[in-house]
């Protein structure tokens, strides 16, 4: 009985903490329904005179070339293939490293781990020059954003998956080999189904990070009609700073929603999709 | 013939390297060679449109005499020194709070992680800008509490804190790792200590903290690397201002590379940042054996 009461009190404390922590997001959501003057005079969650003008303005065209929905479509049009290609390449690499022997494996492994601490900042200039020479700047296929990831550029995921591969006993591979599977078939039919939770969590994280990525599109996408969401959101702030805050906040809110949705869905389908997340920033 | 056979055998034995070939190509093309390129670039005056006219150490000499760069390095170090401990301590505190088996704890874990998934997003930075504006949400709260309002984004001393607070708010990623580490501590260990009469505080410092120290160390290092490279938040919230007080080195690097197209100077700056990171991580690694407790060696608790 006493233990139960203790749990209730503990739960209330945690709830208060969560409300404080998430209040900025709740305030953001409610402010999208406020008049512009009211945004900076009200601290509560219920708008005194609710309006939909912010949401309506959020969907209007920006400079005639891009609007919120097309920016969102642009984003997911390259992020989804990026996620799929990341998962394929990362799985193959982790499989190769954790299950097989080949010449030079130790050196490659060392190089792999060293890239974990390689600051992306150092790579901006040379990669920009490289992509410029390749003619990939402003590529309609978003090549500079997809290709490095499609070649297993995210070390974090390789290392995570290697740990998962290590936790699967090699007897599974042996049994399948005796049944006549080659190594690729073993991976596809035996190991990938077991890795499903890990793959989902890597996929979700890559999705969230890629949607959040701002520097990449900022450097490599020049044509306004190809702008992804992150650039659009920044532009909408630059254009409106000072007056149409309800529009800006509505844009932010809509930009965040798919991510929050993906996160909650993933949270339900796997045990702990975010456990990988601690590995990066 | 024999040699041919031996070669075939060599190929057969090493054929599984094919699995990592995509990674090797990506590593060479997008990481290793660009690194080398940027190193060489730092010793030239490469301008994206004017090309190279001189080769030498002048970019590094310029960095040493450029007050703006030196100040940016100082601010970057200050920012890193503040944000990393604050974020890790917050994450540790919340992880301890959530390390409990009770009904609904998973819901709380989900909620406490939520700010982190918005992570580096521009939308989160804009939200922060709205919160800390003059007459913004935070200042309204301050005046409700009869405290003086602060010009967060105009006051050089306050602006850096706005960015720090945003990053601390997103404590979720280290929290998840620390929470996982806390859960792996065998309960028998805690119970034994409790039977010996240890209180909650000494259990934390003598058992929990040493047991999670490897993870704590690792996550601190990751945060350190991330903080040194911070770009999005200062770029969106303050654009380096007021009066350069939030101009981190990455902002300066971006400006000289992509608005002035001085690729050589930017490369030199990037390498200074890289060396700084390496030195800090290196120093940190050297202290590892003192700071981190390894179960195999420690033995008798």
Image (tube, coloured by chain):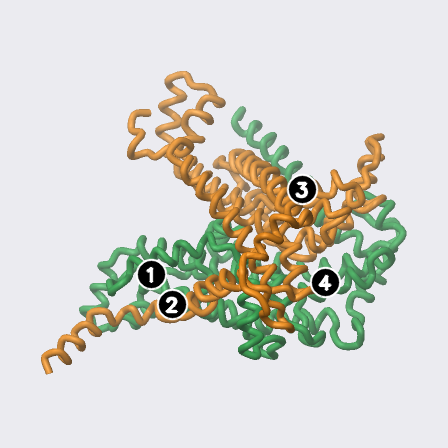
- Dots 2 and 4: beta carbons under 8 Å? no
Tag 3, which secondary structure? helix
Tag 1, which secondary structure? helix
Chain coloured orange: B
Q: Is residue B284 above or below residue A25?
A: above
Residue that numbered label 2 is attached to: B24
**Mark 1 or mark 3, whichever is nearer to me:** 1
Left or right, residue B79 beside residue B178: right
- Give the residue displayed 60% in from the left and 75% down from the top: A137
- Give the residue displayed 85% in from the left and 30% down from the top: B146
Residue that numbered label 3 is attached to: B165
Tag 4, which secondary structure? helix
Q: Residues within 10 Å of mark 2 (few under 14, many from 20)?
A: many
Residue that numbered label 1 is attached to: A108
As drawn, which residue projects farthest toward the left? B2
- Give the residue displayed 39% in from the left and 39% down from the top: B184
| Image location (x, y in percent) of residue A105 | 28, 61
Residue that numbered label 4 is attached to: A233
Q: Residues within 10 Å of mark 1 (few under 14, many from 20)?
A: some
Left or right, residue B75 beside residue A271: right
- Give the residue displayed 87% in from the left and 55% down from the top: A36
- Dots 2 and 1: beta carbons under 8 Å? yes
Chain coloured green: A
As drawn, which residue projects farthest toward the top? B197
Instruction: Tell me the distance, in whole angstroms, between the alpha carbons under discs 2 and 1.
Output: 8 Å
Tag 2, which secondary structure? helix
Could one spot residue A88 in this view of the protein?
no
């Amino acid at each position: 009985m006493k233990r139960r009461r203790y749990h209730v009190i503990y739960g209330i404390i945690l709830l208060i903490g969560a409300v404080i922590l998430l209040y900025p997001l709740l305030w953001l959501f409610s402010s999208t329904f406020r008049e512009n003057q009211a945004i900076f005079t009200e601290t509560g969650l219920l708008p005194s005179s609710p309006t939909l003008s912010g949401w309506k303005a959020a969907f209007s065209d920006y400079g005639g070339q891009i609007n919120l929905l097309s920016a969102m479509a642009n984003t997911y049009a390259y992020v989804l293939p990026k996620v799929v290609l990341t998962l394929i390449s990362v799985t193959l690499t982790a499989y190769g490293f954790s299950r097989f022997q080949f010449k030079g494996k130790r050196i490659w492994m060392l190089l792999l781990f060293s890239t974990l601490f390689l600051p992306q900042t150092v790579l901006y200039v040379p990669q920009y020059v490289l992509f410029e020479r390749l003619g990939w700047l402003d590529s309609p296929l978003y090549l500079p954003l997809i290709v490095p990831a499609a070649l297993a550029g995210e070390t974090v995921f390789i290392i995570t998956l290697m740990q998962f591969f290590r936790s699967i006993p090699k007897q599974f591979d042996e049994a399948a080999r005796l049944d006549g599977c080659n190594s690729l078939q073993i991976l596809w039919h035996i190991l990938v189904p077991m890795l499903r939770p890990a793959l989902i969590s890597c996929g979700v994280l890559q999705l969230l990070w890629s949607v959040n990525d701002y520097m990449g599109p900022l450097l490599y996408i020049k044509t306004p009609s190809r702008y992804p969401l992150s650039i659009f959101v920044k532009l909408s702030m630059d254009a409106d700073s000072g007056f149409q805050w309800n529009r800006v906040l509505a844009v932010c809110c809509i930009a965040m929603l798919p991510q929050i949705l993906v996160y909650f869905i993933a949270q339900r389908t796997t045990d702990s999709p975010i456990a990988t997340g601690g590995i990066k920033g | 013939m024999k040699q041919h056979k031996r070669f075939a055998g060599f190929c057969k034995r090493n054929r599984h390297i094919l699995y990592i070939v995509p990674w090797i190509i990506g590593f060479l093309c997008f990481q290793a060679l660009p690194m080398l390129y940027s190193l060489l670039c730092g010793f030239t005056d490469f301008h994206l449109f004017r090309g190279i006219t001189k080769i030498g150490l002048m970019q590094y000499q310029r960095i040493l005499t450029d007050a703006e760069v030196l100040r940016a390095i100082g601010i970057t170090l200050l920012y890193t020194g503040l944000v990393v401990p604050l974020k890790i301590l917050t994450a540790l505190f919340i992880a301890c709070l959530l390390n409990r088996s009770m009904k609904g704890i998973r819901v709380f874990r989900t909620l406490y992680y939520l700010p982190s998934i918005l992570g580096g997003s521009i939308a989160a930075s804009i939200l922060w800008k709205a919160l800390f504006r003059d007459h913004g949400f935070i200042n309204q709260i301050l005046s409700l509490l009869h405290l003086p309002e602060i010009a967060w984004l105009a006051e050089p001393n306050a602006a850096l804190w706005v960015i720090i607070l945003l990053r601390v708010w997103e404590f979720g990623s280290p929290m998840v790792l620390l929470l996982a580490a806390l859960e792996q501590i065998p309960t028998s260990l805690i119970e034994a200590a409790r039977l010996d009469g240890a209180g909650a505080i000494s259990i934390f410092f003598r058992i929990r903290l040493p047991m999670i120290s490897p993870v704590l160390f690792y996550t601190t290092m990751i945060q350190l690397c991330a903080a040194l490279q911070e770009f999005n938040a200062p770029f969106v919230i303050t654009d380096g201002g007021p009066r350069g007080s939030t101009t981190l080195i990455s902002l300066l690097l971006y400006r000289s590379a992509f608005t002035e197209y001085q690729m050589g100077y930017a490369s030199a700056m990037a390498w200074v940042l890289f060396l700084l990171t390496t030195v800090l991580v290196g120093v940190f690694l050297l202290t590892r054996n003192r700071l981190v407790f390894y179960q195999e060696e420690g033995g008798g608790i």
